[in-house]
Image: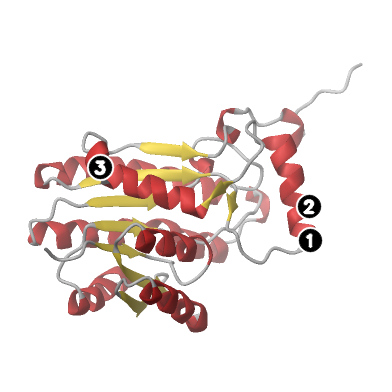
Amino acid sequence: MENKVCFLTGSGSGNGRSMALRMAELGYDIALHHSGRDPQSAEEIRSQIAALGRRAEVFVEDLSQSGAAARLFCQFAEKFDRLDIFVNNAGITRFSRIPEMTEEMYDQLMNIDLRAACFCIKEACLFMRERGIKGSVVAIASNHHSRLWLSAAAYGSAKEAMCRYVKYAAMEFCRDGIRVNCIAPGYIDREYGQSDKTKETFARISRTEIPMHRFVTSREIADWTEFISSPAGLSLTGQTIDLDGGASIVGAAMQEYGLILEEE
């Protein structure tokens, strides 16, 4: 039997890189993708995966451009003839209050975080359907889809739209045995090179904003991806799972929005 294949977008660095390594440890051959900005990092993770005895291929495509999803999957189809798990991890984070929001920032965020996600999910589902593979698609969203944080109007809207799109994709491809779900992390401990200042900031956030006082790790997100895609997850489709230590169930403080009235 062929080795199972996991394809992760945005896996040349950061969260996607750590997820790719974990999925290789779990026994999958890996298709890596990056935008072209850091080819050295992608090559390093490819070498680490190969050292585990798993196959790894690297694909380069700028997902901010029109037609990128179709081009990316054409590249993928030249190297692989099966796809068991597709992880839409590629994304950017941009924050701005609405009065300062620019069309350039909005377009860049929506093109990558929403448009590219929608069309990559489409291509992954079609690839699986055409080959009769009852695969699993997992979109990495954010807990911004459900809670309001200051300066996140565009980013949170993109993530909520992604979660909604996943429900439609789940309905349209369920007859093919293809399941589509979301994982929505909060703050992620990416387990790589943080400055002392960043670590201090993260420690403060963990103490004051996360009920369970811990960040989710990239390896945990990969483990959840594998669980959702395993026989244990066969009844799960069209769902969003928040992995954020309870941060999304804490209401945003009114003082963040300047809505506390001064006592007379």
**How many angstroms separate mark 1 from mark 2 (CA)?**
6 Å
Percent from the top left, x then y, of residue 181? 32, 44
Looking at the rendered structure, which numbered label has been put on residue 196? 1
What residue lies at 15% left-to-right and 42% top-to-bottom? 174
**How many angstroms separate mark 3 from mark 2 (CA)?**
41 Å
Looking at the rendered structure, which numbered label has been put on residue 200? 2
Say which quadrant the N terminus sits in. bottom left
Say whether residue 56 is left or right of residue 91: left
Say which quadrant the C terminus sits in. top right
Secondary element at image label 1: helix
Q: Which residue is mark 3?
A: 168
Say whether residue 261 is left or right of residue 56: right
Q: At label 1, which amino acid type do we have?
A: Asp
Percent from the top left, x then y, of residue 11? 43, 67
Say whether residue 77 is left or right of residue 130: right
In contact (CB < 8 Å): disc 1 and disc 2: yes
Looking at the image, residue 36 lies above or below residue 105: below
**How many angstroms separate mark 1 from mark 3 (CA)?**
43 Å
Which of pointers 3 and 2 indicates the residue nearer the eye? 2
